[in-house]
Image (cartoon, rainbow, N blue to C red):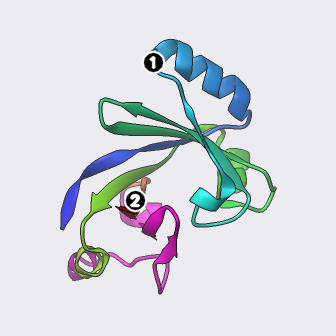
Amino acid sequence: MIKGIYGLNIAVADLDTATKKYENILGVSGKFITEENFAFPGLKGTSFDVNGFHLNLIASTSPDTSVAKFIEKKGEGVFLLSLEVGDMDQALGDMRGQGLTPLLKESAKGVFGEVNFIHPKEMNGVQLEIFKPAK
């Protein structure tokens, strides 16, 4: 079951410049996200908590990440919509019941919590992140 929209992730080429821009516009200080807080290596980011909504800027430290490939193909912009769930297995089961296919056979787990994805082709061009945050 979906608890709500957790946030939005934006792919950026220059994390420092984008962070300063968003800090000025939002009036909120960003929190650096280290590589260990991502399901896949080669990423870094900045997170903004805007009244409980998480706006994340994500940059690639490697040319072979999905973020780097996204920027190369489409340019900077909305990378994914993150949905928060309380029970990953139940949420993925519900999505399978609606004809959606999770990208990962086994959800990725780490210090960040647990995560899986639905391909943009199945969601009108928007990648979904199914996210169960760590407690």
Percent coordinates x, y for residue 116 in the rendering: 44, 71
Give above or below for 106 relative to 35. Answer: below
Q: Position of residue 58 (x, y in %)?
A: 61, 44
Q: Secondary structure at mark 1?
A: helix
Magenta stretch: residue 98 in it?
yes
Residue placed most toward the observer, 76 or 111: 111
- Tag 2 secondary structure: strand
Nearest the eye: 3 or 126 = 3
Q: Is residue 117 magenta?
A: yes
Residue 121 percent coordinates (x, y): 44, 64
Query: Circle 1 is placed at which residue position?
Result: 26
Image height of 113 relative to 68, above or below: below
Q: CA distance from mark 2 to mark 1?
A: 24 Å
Q: Which residue is mark 2?
A: 128
Q: Which residue lies at the image location 32% right of the left edge and 75% below the top edge?
A: 100
How many residues crowd mark 1 within 10 Å: few (<14), some (14–19), many (20+)? few
Q: Quadrant of residue 95?
A: bottom left
Q: Say which amino acid is labelled 2.
A: Leu
Nearer the observer: mark 2 or 1; the answer is 1
- Residue at 42% x, 53% y: name it: 126
Taking the view exactly as shown, the residue that stands out farthest to the bottom is: 105
Which numbered disc flags the more N-terminal residue, 2 or 1?
1
Q: What amino acid is labelled 1 in the image?
A: Leu
